[in-house]
Amino acid sequence: MRKIVLTIIGLFVISAIASAQELKKDIFGIRAGLNLSHVTLSESAYGMSINIETDSKASFHAGFSYQRLLIPTTPLYLETGFYFSQKGFKYSLASEDIDITLNSTAMYLQIPVLLNYHFAVANNIIIQPFAGLYLSYGIGGKTRMNLGNNKISENTFGDDGYIRIDAGIRLGVGATFDKIYLGIGYEPGLINISNESDITAKNTNWAFTVGYNF
């Protein structure tokens, strides 16, 4: 009996060592995909608060990712990268007295800082839930407004627009099929990006991503 127990323990240790040896320390990848973003607006005036949920706008993101193994025997990774991410929103208001449409585009350079865990569910199939933060810097964009017959176009970032710094939470799950990556992420913004003292604006984005790991 003792020999059987020692044999089982020995096989377990050998299996754990073998699994640890299979874990890659560094994983590099390229990523691209679809953004569905909108902005939540809140305006305070005369003691009243008005909340507006804008319509989603389809855009894209692209960049590269880097994952670093944190614990040699556990598939827990620190993930970061560098991305170009385009966000924005659409909004329309029509009545007998007024007809307004807004179309805003905001282009960001974005860095995520995430923790993810790799669950091997089948041969060459790994599920990767992740959670963390993102930090973005706005580099350009246009906001176009149609007010009846008047058309106005302004820079998205500036004194009359958004501040350039944005940050928020990033949650989601990815999966790798051999070296092919598929993922979905949710990015609620935490920072008020409005320059107006009586207006609060926060980005929200759904990101659908495909990629390849080297």
Image (tube, rainbow, N blue to C red):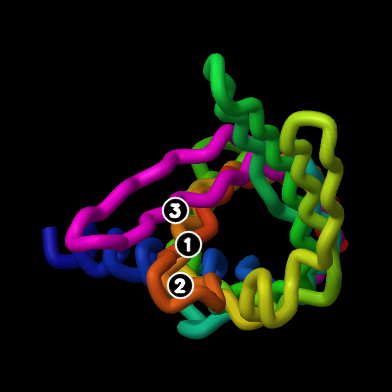
Image quarter for residue 55? top right
Magenta segment, which residues?
28-57
Per the model, the C-alpha gap separating discs 2 and 1 is: 5 Å
What is the secondary structure assignment of the residue under circle 3?
strand
Report whether residue 7 is seen: yes
- For the residue marked with disc 1, what is the amino acid? Ala
Query: For the stretch drawn in magenta, what is the main secondary structure?
Result: strand
Image quarter for residue 113? bottom right
Place of residue 80 in the rendered image (x, y in percent of width and height, measured from the top left): 65, 76
Q: Is residue 167 above or below residue 91?
A: below
* Neighbours of disc 2 within 10 Å: few (<14), some (14-19), many (20+): some
Q: Is residue 37 above or below residue 18?
A: above
Place of residue 105 in the rendered image (x, y in percent of width and height, measured from the top left): 77, 53
* Neighbours of disc 1 within 10 Å: few (<14), some (14-19), many (20+): many
Position of residue 109 in the picture relative to residue 73 (left or right)? right
Location of mark 3 (residue): 41
Location of mark 2 (residue): 192
Report whether residue 84 is seen: no
